[in-house]
Image: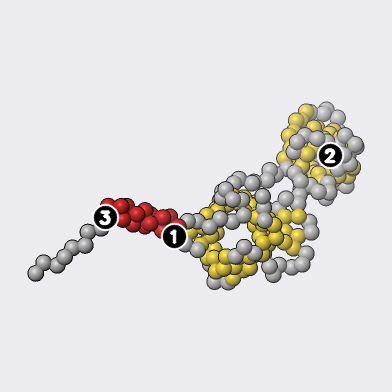
């Protein structure tokens, strides 16, 4: 005896196929993060937080009273209850540098002229110019960031350090038998060390509207509390 075959109408087949497609999209949908999450358990005078943007970008900042110790920017994605962070935005901080010109002085002394500026070229008034090895070099530049020294001609080098509060000091070595004009460009401190070309993979243990619990590669959990909802 032949077993009867139940025929499904074409309309029901189409509806079933559409249901499977919607279920697949729903199951694979990515959760999105929005707003700022601060890590719990850090010292009271420190901070560590992520700011997530709905379009898939994030920023990270960690530091204390003096500003960021570390920071970074990049993109994130969530897949299979795992948060992937890619520090892909170049946030490298330029170092202080200088430009030098020199000339020969036919006397038994040399001239040293120093102009101190920030990285944008604006003068840094009253910056310090000194040498740990040569006491003759020790002066605060004027309001235009300019200072001039008359130094004894020597056959070795002069070590010169330029510094000012809030900026990274810069040390320069010049031969002591020529006259020099130095344009010194200082970079600001307090911006921290950038994180770049780095990735983190964090398992999402809990995901709520108020907090996240994330598990790192060392199997330790950290709790991130939402402190700002973002735009």
- The numbered dot on residue 124 is 2
Alpha carbons under labels 1 and 3: distance apart: 27 Å
Image x and y of residue 231, in percent = 66, 50
Q: Nearer the viewer, residue 56 or 117?
A: 56
- Quadrant where the N terminus lies? bottom left
Occupied quadrant, residue 20: bottom left
Occupied quadrant, residue 146: top right
Q: Is residue 131 above or below residue 178?
A: below
Mark 1 vs mark 2: give the one in front: 1
Occupied quadrant, residue 33: bottom right
Alpha carbons under labels 1 and 2: distance apart: 58 Å
In the image, taking residue 191 as reference, residue 149 lies left or right, namely right
Q: Which residue is mark 1?
A: 27
* Residue at the extreme left of the image, as rendered: 1
**Which structural element holds mark 2?**
loop
Specify few, some or many for label 2: CA neighbours under 10 Å numbering under 14, 14-19, or 20 or more.
many
Q: Which residue is mark 3?
A: 9
The image's colouring method is: secondary structure
């Amino acid at each position: 005896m032949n077993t009867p075959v139940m025929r499904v109408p074409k309309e029901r087949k189409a509806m079933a196929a559409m249901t499977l497609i919607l279920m697949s999209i729903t199951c694979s949908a990515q959760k999105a993060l929005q707003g700022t999450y601060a890590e719990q358990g850090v010292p009271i005078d420190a901070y560590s937080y992520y700011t997530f943007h709905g379009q898939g970008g994030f920023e990270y900042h960690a530091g204390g009273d003096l500003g960021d110790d570390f920071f970074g920017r990049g993109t994130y994605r969530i897949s299979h209850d795992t948060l992937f962070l890619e520090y892909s935005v170049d946030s490298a901080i330029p170092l202080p540098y200088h430009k030098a010109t020199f000339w020969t002085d036919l006397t038994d002394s040399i001239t040293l002229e120093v102009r101190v500026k920030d990285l944008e070229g604006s003068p840094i008034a009253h910056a310090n110019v000194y040498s740990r090895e040569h006491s003759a070099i020790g002066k605060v530049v004027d309001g235009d960031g300019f200072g001039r020294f008359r130094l004894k001609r020597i056959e070795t080098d002069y070590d010169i350090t330029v510094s000012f509060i809030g900026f990274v000091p810069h040390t320069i070595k010049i031969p002591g038998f020529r006259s020099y004009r130095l344009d010194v460009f200082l970079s600001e401190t307090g911006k921290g060390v950038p994180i770049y070309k780095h990735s983190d993979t964090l398992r999402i243990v809990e995901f709520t509207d108020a907090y996240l619990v994330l598990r790192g590669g060392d199997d330790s959990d950290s709790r991130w509390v939402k402190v700002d909802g973002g735009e």
